[in-house]
Image: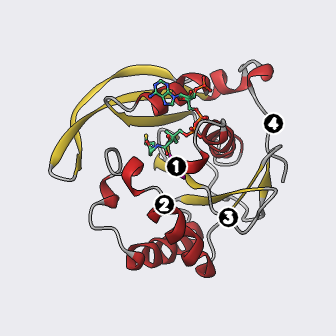
């Protein structure tokens, strides 16, 4: 399995994705603050969120990238590169089995335009083409219909239910587990895809 993911920006028709920089704290914090109510039901780290979390996240993200543990991207629209509209991450979970996982969120005012699918496709493409993964997994809290829809649009296959998988606030949430294989990704119908990233 390869480990290297270059840090140059990636572009789609509407978006730019790049690694976080320390000066992104303000735009990240602003986007999370504007999205708290929609992120809260699904993401464990929102509980007790404050700006210090954003600072620690970026510090950890820069370290994880250089140590080749995880690759987090800030998602920005091409028409306003100063605006952070979400995160997408890809990280290896088993080198021996060449498996990895993808995760994402989109700023609330920007949902429903296909940005989540467009950005996740870049991260998954990096997983297969650069990290040489065999399988990418996606875990989604039961009831998170928008994310399930995204999984379907991206070509993932439903695998089953993981009981009490993640504690969000005071509640343990069951999650559905989804996956896509390298062969399936390579065979995906190209007309489903908005644009592949070009570096
Ligand atoms: C899930 C999330 C990333 C989707 O982002 P997005 O940019 O809106 O995603 P897309 O527009 O690419 O696709 C969303 C799809 O879900 C559909 N959808 C959204 N809410 C829905 C609902 N309540 N019921 C049915 N479908 C819904 C949209 O119509 C769209 O499908 P379409 O393209 O066929 O119209 C975003 O809602 C989000 O950040 N949610 C909170 C955090 C989160 O859940 N992260 C993922 C954890 S696994």
Q: Nearer the viewer, mark 3 or mark 4?
A: 3
Residue 199: say if magenta. Answer: no
In the rendered structure, which segment of residues is drawn in magenta? Answer: 104-108
Which structural element holds mark 2?
loop
Q: Which residue was labeled with disc 1?
A: 108
Q: Is mark 1 within 8 Å of ligand 1?
A: yes
State the CA–CA distance, disc 3 to disc 2.
Answer: 12 Å
Residue 106: say if magenta. Answer: yes
Say if mark 2 contacts mark 4, CB within 8 Å: no
Q: Earlier in the sequence, mark 3 or mark 4?
A: 3
- Residue 35 rendering spot, x and y as whole percentages: 46, 55
Say if mark 2 contacts mark 1, CB within 8 Å: yes
Q: Nearer the viewer, mark 2 or mark 4?
A: 2
Q: Residue drawn 23% across and 38% down?
A: 173
State the CA–CA distance, disc 2 to disc 4.
Answer: 28 Å
Q: Residue drawn 57% across and 59% down?
A: 72
Q: Which residue was labeled with disc 3?
A: 83
Q: Residue drawn 84% across and 48% down?
A: 198
Horizontal arrangement in the rendering, residue 142 relative to residue 73 (left or right): left
Q: Earlier in the sequence, mark 3 or mark 2?
A: 2
Q: Which residue was labeled with disc 4?
A: 195
Which of the two residues, 102 or 186, is positioned nearer the viewer here? Answer: 102
Q: Which residue was labeled with disc 2?
A: 34
Which of the two residues, 28 or 102, is positioned nearer the viewer here? Answer: 28
Q: Nearer the viewer, mark 4 or mark 1?
A: 1
Horizontal arrangement in the rendering, residue 15 relative to residue 199 (left or right): left
Asked whether residue 139 is in view, the answer is yes
State the CA–CA distance, disc 1 to disc 3.
Answer: 13 Å
Q: Earlier in the sequence, mark 4 or mark 1?
A: 1
């Amino acid at each position: 399995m390869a480990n290297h993911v270059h840090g140059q920006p990636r572009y789609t028709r509407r978006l730019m994705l790049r690694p976080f920089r320390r000066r992104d704290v303000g735009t990240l914090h602003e986007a999370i603050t504007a999205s708290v109510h929609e992120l809260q039901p699904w993401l464990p780290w929102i509980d007790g969120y404050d700006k210090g979390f954003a600072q620690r996240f970026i510090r950890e993200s820069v370290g994880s990238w250089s140590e080749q543990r995880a690759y987090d991207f800030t998602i920005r629209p091409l028409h306003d590169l100063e605006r952070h509209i979400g995160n997408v991450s890809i990280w290896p979970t088993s080198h021996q089995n060449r498996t990895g996982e993808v995760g994402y969120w989109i700023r609330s005012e920007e949902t429903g335009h296909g940005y989540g699918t467009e950005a996740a496709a870049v991260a998954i493409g990096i997983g297969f083409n650069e990290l040489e993964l065999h399988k990418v997994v996606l875990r989604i809290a039961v009831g998170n219909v928008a994310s399930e829809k995204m999984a379907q649009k991206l070509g993932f296959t439903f695998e089953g239910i993981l009981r009490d998988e993640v504690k969000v606030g005071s509640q343990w949430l069951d999650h559905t587990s989804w996956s896509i294989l390298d062969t399936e990704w390579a065979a995906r119908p190209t007309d489903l895809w908005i644009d592949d990233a070009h570096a």
